[in-house]
Image (tube, grey):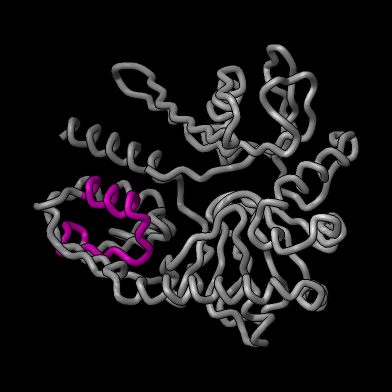
Amino acid sequence: MNFNKISFRVFKVTDCPWFRVGDVFFVSGNAVSMNSAEGNSQFITTIVNSPPHREYCKILCGDFNRLVIEHERADLIPEGVISCGGCLGQIKLEYRLKDFLDEDDFEEEEDDHTGLLLLLQNFPFFRNIDRTDLNDVIKLFNRRKYTGNEIIIRRGARGDNFYVVIAGRLNVLNDAALHIASLTVGDVFGEMSLLSDEDASATVQASGPCEILYIDNRKFKKILSKYPTLQNYFTRLLAHRLSHSNKYRTGDIVTSMAGKLQEIPPEALFQTLNASRKTGILTITQLSKGTARFSLRQGSIIRASYGGKKGKNAFYDIFKEKEGTYKFTPGLPPEDFDAPEIGYFMKLLMEGLHKAEDQGGEN
């Protein structure tokens, strides 16, 4: 089961014995409410990844859980500031999607910069820069936050910036929108376009809310000229990426799937595609209303059509079918790279099953 993560960063600490400015918590999960003849039920899953080498705090985890329940999904929590419930002390955390800071909310902006400095000094890229110069180098970078499915770099576009991931997770996609790599906190990208003066060779897309530092070509090359050790860093990085690319090409990542609904029912088929984060088009033929087509990106459904219906209603109708032949073909057309999801997968699945059961009971 896959949940999009969002990050909360500590920017103010008042007598808290456990956490420090700059600590980052990753929160994911969902709260699904279901209505049935037996009564109302709520299914809640909240996952909190605390900073490494820090204590587990039940009070703060409870605060995150209440936010997930209130907004149904972690990645639907609106941007802003939260305070923990408090025990021996208290902390304030930020979650922002916009590329600016509100001075009214962030009286301790300087502390936030200090926290960023502490975070970045351990990143592989910044370890090649003298500690005495690190603060000045970081000031050359701009800071931006992205929402889930936003594209940062599109394959074939001109590369103008160098990027550093400081929160969240990004997917690297090939020309068929197939996932070929992931980028997480501390990873960099965009450097090859600047070093080779060529267009981007892959698309980079946010998996969920994320935060990135970026710098333009002129400033990037200025840093390279001042710190020659970065040349060795990028040489090792290129070798690693080429090795990963070769493993991908020889692997069994993009194999097609085919079979019959008599062997695997629709709900199990879609859960398999979601769990394995498949990207491609699922075609189901020999159905009572003709042919159904579903487009998936990283296991989430972005397009659905069946029996003259589109979107959620087409997806719901497929659960009534017991017989048919399916085939999954990897890859998507470029126009679907950033198409919105038709809905949250687990909620769609559960609603589809309930509708199928209700109509089956009426018959």
**Which quarter of the rendering shows the C terminus?**
top left
Write down the region rendered in magenta: 266-289
Q: Is residue 262 magenta?
A: no
Q: Residue at (66%, 23%) from the top-left corner?
A: 18
| Residue at 21% from the left image edge and 59% from the top image edge | 289
Residue 78: horizontal and vertical position, in percent?
67, 38
Is residue 284 covered in magenta?
yes
- Residue 250 placement: quadrant: bottom left
**Residue 114 in the image: above or below residue 338:** above
Residue extending farthest to the top is 88
Residue 82 appears left or right of 251: right
Quarter where residue 200 is shown:
bottom right
Residue 77, compared with residue 193, is above or below; it is: above
Residue 126 spot, x, y in % from top left: 71, 60
- Reply above or below: 119 against 308: above
Q: Position of residue 150 (x, y in %)?
A: 60, 60
Tell me the residue at 37%/58% (across/down).
Answer: 304
Figure quadrant of residue 305? bottom left
**Residue placed most toward the observer, 287 or 78:** 78
78, 201: nearer the viewer? 201
Extreme residue in the bottom direction: 197
On the rendered structure, is 325 left or right of 139? left
Residue drawn at the location 70% of the way across and 70% of the way down = 162
